[in-house]
Amino acid sequence: MSDELVLKFKVSSFRKIPNPYYVLEDGDKTAEMFVMICDVLDVPNNIPMRTNPREQNLNTGVAKKIRDSLLDPARLDFYLLNRGLLLSAESVSYDNVNSFVSIVFTDLDVHGNVDGGHTYRIIREKNEMLERNQQFVKIEVLTHVESIFESLAAARNTSVQVKEQSIAELEKRFALIKDAFGGEPFFRDISYKENQNKRIDVSVLLAILNLFNIDRYHDMKNYPINSYSSNKQCVDIYINESKANEDNVTNNPYFKMKSIMVDITKLYDALEANMAKYYRGEDDAIKKYGAITGVITRKQGKPKFKSKFYQKEMEYISPNGFIYPVLGSFRALVTEENGVYKWKTDPIAVLEKVGPILVRNTIDMSRSLGNNPNATGKNASLWQVLYMTVKMEVMSEM
């Protein structure tokens, strides 16, 4: 493949961590973890960085602490104090005779540096000032995590986001969300601040609601692709709207959206639970949804998967790169009347009617992009086509 990159470098120690949840079966590839300690002078200078969700600002206080810790000749514990690098890759192999590791990256949209970008850039910037065996860094590599790449990147890059959410919770800025979903069965499953061990993070919910913010995303002028690519940005948008409209809450798009928020979560679950049905259409015996790259199929004898909000049973887990562009197209059904968001028509009925063409177009786009759900979720042309499909359906009804 044109994107393939193999990095080979020396390490001081290497260990493979077995996957505790899955037994490898013929033809299956399950997530695996590899941990290694490497002299900073041996860290490759061409680790792919496209996968890191944030730009690196080397002028921050955190960056200064990393730099000082790395360069302090009296400290020999950099690899203990620093979180190190997290990489996503296709495969890892180890030559235990020569202590060389080989890491294979085949898709640079999902393979590369996921976390530790600041550490990596500082090591590259300052390694000429170090002696061999002076400082070491931990490198963690995860393989076969393409289907959960977005969740992985979000989970490993939440330090700023969690802080902002915790402050917003203290400031009671999520009262609107709590009021809207107070009567729903998943209400107590939403986490709003750090260390709340619940299954739905409010950042995910805000990313989904962002898809329907018609104040910000006007018709076809722009598309809420950030809902797929950055939960952090969606949290920022919500908090900024809350602050900007404190004196007149009726101008807050989330206040306007409150009346349809529950409908949005129901629409999400209806789509998520029926992705396979929409893909197959009338060719149920021919089209195999589970064979599509990025789709996870329930193992025989294992419990069924559950949908995000209402816990509907499912045979498959679909990548967000498929779900978000389709769900975002239903923004075409939202209008504002008297300062309140309303549906132009029943979204569930429209989903049942055009769901098959929306899902098939999405999967066709993924195939055209090299069977890449991540690139699919970021493809502006797809978002436009799906939006126009729903918009035309509404126009034909009217």
Image: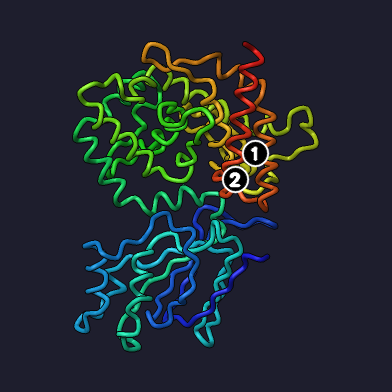
Identify the residue at horizontal 52%, vertical 33% (top origin): 306
User: Where, by quadrant of the figure, is residue 182 drawn?
Assistant: top left
2 or 1: tag closer to the N-terminus? 1
Cα distance, mark 2 to mark 1?
A: 7 Å
Q: Is residue 132 above or below residue 365?
A: below
| Position of residue 118 in the picture relative to residue 141 (left or right) | left
The type of residue carrying mark 1 is Thr
Nearest the eye: 130 or 313: 130
Q: Quadrant of the C terminus?
A: top right
Dot 2 and dot 1 residues touching (CB under 8 Å) = yes
Is residue 277 shown to the viewer in this render?
Answer: no
User: Where, by quadrant of the figure, is residue 179 drawn?
Assistant: top left
Nearest the eye: 47 or 193: 47
Disc on res. 376: 2
Identify the residue at horizontal 51%, vertical 26% (top origin): 331
Percent across and percent down for residue 185 are 40, 23
Count the labels in the image: 2
| Position of residue 164 in the picture relative to residue 266 (left or right) | left
Nearest the eye: 102 or 363: 363
Is residue 312 shown to the viewer in this render?
Answer: yes
Q: What residue is shown with label 1?
A: 362
